[in-house]
Amino acid sequence: MGVSAIADRQAQKALVTGSAWMTAGSIFSRILGAIYVIPWYLWMGHAAAAGNALFARGYNIYSLFLIISTAGIPSAVSKQVAHYLASGAYASAKRLFERSLVLMIGLGVVSAGALWGLTPLLALQNGQVDPRMLPVLHALVWPLLLIPPMSIFRGYFQGFAEMAPSAISQLLEQFARVVYMLGSTYLIMKAGSGDYVQAVAHSTFGAFVGAVLALGYLIGVYWRRHEAFVEVTAVPPAPTKTLLQEVLRQSLPFIILDAGTVLYQFFDQYSFPELLHHFFLVSEPQQEYLYGLFAFNTNKLVMIVVSLASAMAVTAIPLLATAYTHRDRRGVADQIENILRLFFLVMWPSALGMAAVARPLYTLFYVDDHLGEAMLAFDAYVAIFMGLFTVLAAVMQGLYQNRQAIRYFLIGLGVKMLVQYPLVFWTVSFGPLVATLIGMATTVVLMLLALDRQYDLDWARLGHDVTQLLLASLVMFGCVVVVVGGLSVAIGGMRKLTAVPVLLVGATVGVAVYGYLILRWRLADDLFGPRLAAIRRRLRIR
């Protein structure tokens, strides 16, 4: 086996291992962040729909501020640390981390102050200040102080291809957040005043509680593993000014592209109520119900699927930066193709599987609502394009194609803005989702064409592999739809209690069918190597 083949196999192993850690941490974190909805929704009682909409509006604003406050620097740090390590400039990597950490502490303070000061303006709804938004946004000021420096630790570890600390810290952060959310909501709604605005405000403050625990863990990992990290070559560290200039230059694209899905949601938050009132006669509760369906209810579940793509994207950036630094054009092309194979290996069955079990899944978390269930199924398809955008944006940034990535994203966002107006008129609450699908699909096509022009991807082989994965996922989808539909008829409707066994049986059938086809058709052997052959022998699959 040649040197390039060994390097490619090592890169594949790093991609799979890193993605496994980040996927596990991200998906369990998202699942934990979705499961809390079941008791939270019940305890909110009659205020559940209003609480959903209020929570979604506050978190959309917070998410945008969070992305601006981190300024794309953590991802840029990950990319540049990998670049310095590949060049042997270890001291530069260490100094970059230290200076970036100081910078992020300052940005956290500035962004927290900005959110507090702009709260009255951001709380505007239909031209008037919504007083319910004020305590919610004020509660979200505090996590902005901690999450920017916390993200620098994660970016630094990821530059070393150490994905475990990031994954574990995500779980700890989400666990502490959910415990605080549920505890405070129960005390307020069941044992206290019953003020749902106060309950939502405390629920959002849980982000600060989670950040405290996660940051403490990351500092401990750094102290144990990296505090003694020093230069082991004669290469002196680059000047601080040069390091920060490089990071800031790389960070701007990360701000825009990391904010991609958030900007889409931010546009929906302010345009959808206006368009709804323009086209239809709707009451305030009806508006909050429709907005909450796609902005909170379905989004909360679909983001579990999108988080899979985000995990792969985080893993891809340092690996691509390393290949790019070594000027390995064929290695870069192979990495891109492996990333796409891994993406579709996971995303096809995840999205189609969620669509297949949409009814019991939505009922378990909320209520048996046919509109919500149909919207969840459609949103699962949208997640494929959202996830692919996330991965391709990371790939282009890892290859220093920042301007092109931003341009393609802005074109897609412009397309969404243009088509949203007629789509809300034609499809009401489905309008923002359809517009998002069209906008994301536009960006994805432009990015794929650009990468193909630059690196001459092997579309014949890649297309065959992706099509085979889609076929296996469609077979799985059909089996699960039949099973879920049959069980729903047999039990005479869907309720929270009956949704659990239906969901478990449907998910088990889906995993079994897809797993069998992956092994039988050898669809993942290139990525996972001889491990799958050993599994086939044990299961006696030829």
Image: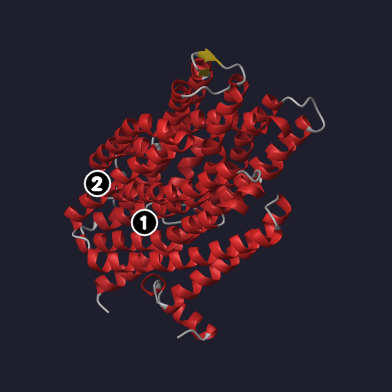
Say which of 81 and 496 sits in front.
Answer: 496
The colour style of the image is: secondary structure
Left or right of residue 227, residue 439 in this image: left
Residue at the location (33% across, 40% down)? 439
Identified by mark 1, the residue type is Val
Give the x, y percent position of residue 95.
38, 42
Q: Answer yes or no: is residue 456 visible.
A: yes
Give the x, y percent position of residue 409.
30, 39
Residue at the location (38% across, 49% down)? 385
Residue at the location (46% across, 38% down)? 430
Left or right of residue 15, residue 239 in this image: left
Q: Could you tell which of marks 1 and 2 lies nearer the N-terminus?
A: 1
Point out the frontmost of discs 1 and 2: 2
Q: Quadrant of residue 73?
A: top left
Mark 2 surroundings within 10 Å by alpha-carbon count, few (fewer than 14), some (14 through 19), many (20 or more) = some
Give the x, y percent position of residue 46.
72, 31
Give the x, y percent position of residue 433.
43, 40
Q: Which residue is mark 1?
A: 232
Q: State how far apart marks 1 and 2 are (Cα).
A: 43 Å
Q: Which residue is mark 2?
A: 446
Identified by mark 2, the residue type is Leu
Q: Secondary structure at mark 2?
A: helix
Q: Quadrant of residue 511?
A: bottom right
In the displayed structure, 318 sits above or below 335; it is above
Say which of 384 and 423 sits in front.
Answer: 423
Q: Answer yes or no: is residue 230 visible.
A: no
Q: Which quadrant is home to the N terminus?
A: bottom left
